[in-house]
Amino acid sequence: MAVQDIVYAELFTSDKVAAVDYFVSALGFSKVADSVETDRSSVLLRQGDVKLVVTSGRGVWRFLDEHGDGIADIAFSCEDPAAAVERAVAAGAARLDSSRGTVVVSGFGGVAHTLLPASAPPGEPLADGRRWTPCPPLAKRAAPARIRLLDHVAVCLAGGTLDWYADYYRDAFGFSRYSSEYVAVGGQAMDSIVVRSASGRATFTLVAPDPAKEPGQLDTFLEHNSGPGVQHLAFLVDDIIAAVGEARDRGVEFLNTPDTYYDLLAERFDGDTDRIAELRKAQVLADRDEWGHLLQLFSRSPYERNTLFFELIQRQGSRGFGSANIRALYEAVELDRLTS
């Protein structure tokens, strides 16, 4: 009954052409298939093991009016979807209507979870009830393929609800708590809990502002998104320096990292000046834990409400989420929020 994997994340957008072009031209995804329904049309994109569905049309207007462009569905695979939905409903999930005959339950805010069988029927890219028409393969990829898998999904929640949602994903979908972090920056603070499926292939980083502190970037997200939502998708790459350089050349805007960050980095990285100079040039963040190193960088949001953004992450043995970088990310996003 427990969740095994994330099958796809579905983005609802008011401009499907621009959204698809961003993923294909700038981030290296490929078009796999198209689906046209009476009230919406979708494109299935893939890179490595990551599948994204980009959807527009009058059937998604209600979501767009409330939340703007953003992730509306994170589909889970499980051995027995019928049993999985019963477990989720027993834990407090709402069973949502689906015109395709699939099982859909509530997640957080306006985000739903479609529960799918662990394997799709032969010849079908997804077992989600849509009729998909394969796209002809391109002779040449628009951008190099760098992304291997979806490392984690960051979810922004309202202050004071973090523990409730961590328990909800445990009881409804079989996730367990992996780690937690509290970060205070000036008069602001955020709390986070990482939850992960038993398979280890579905990971959510739940973040929320501390309601006892001054409002900051997470409060701004919640305001612009009209409630909880997916803050960012983290894509795992093997060579982040190359991936960031190529994405930047193709139009992806990344957050600026304070120069003082790299001055302090030498103390944590044993004075490896050549490596630090390379990271400084690329503006990539670095951290390490008892298992190894972690490199990461975050994009600016390409959407009008400045909500959803993306992360490129490279793991060199590290199993964590960049504890020392959480503060740097918070400060970088806060600076970007105040100056943009």
Image: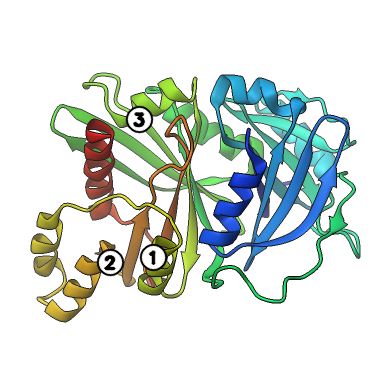
User: Is the Cβ of the residue at disc 3 closer than 8 Å to that at disc 2?
Assistant: no
Q: Please determine whether, in this image, residue 84 is positioned above or below residue 152.
A: above
Q: Please determine whether, in this image, residue 199 is positioned above or below residue 86.
A: below
Check disc 3: other Cα within 10 Å, few if <14, some if 14-19, many if 20+. many
Where residue 292 appears, x then y in whole percent?
32, 72
Camera-side residue of 302 and 228? 302
The amino acid sitting under disc 3 is Leu
What residue lies at 63% left-to-right and 50% top-to-bottom? 20
Q: Which label sits on residue 282?
A: 2
The amino acid sitting under disc 2 is Ala
Check disc 2: other Cα within 10 Å, few if <14, some if 14-19, many if 20+. some
Q: Which residue is mark 1?
A: 244
Camera-side residue of 309 and 102? 309
Q: Please determine whether, in this image, residue 72 is positioned above or below residue 45.
A: above
Quadrant of the image occupied by residue 96: top right
Q: Is residue 208 left or right of residue 77?
A: left
What residue lies at 43% left-to-right and 60% top-to-bottom? 312
Q: Secondary structure at mark 3?
A: helix
Of pointers 2 and 1, the one earlier in the residue sequence: 1
User: Is the Cβ of the residue at disc 2 closer than 8 Å to that at disc 1?
Assistant: yes
What residue lies at 36% left-to-right and 39% top-to-bottom? 192
Marks 2 and 1, how far apart in space? 7 Å
Where residue 284 appears, x then y in whole percent?
28, 63
Q: Secondary structure at mark 2?
A: helix
Q: Which residue is mark 3?
A: 218
Marks 3 and 2, how far apart in space? 26 Å
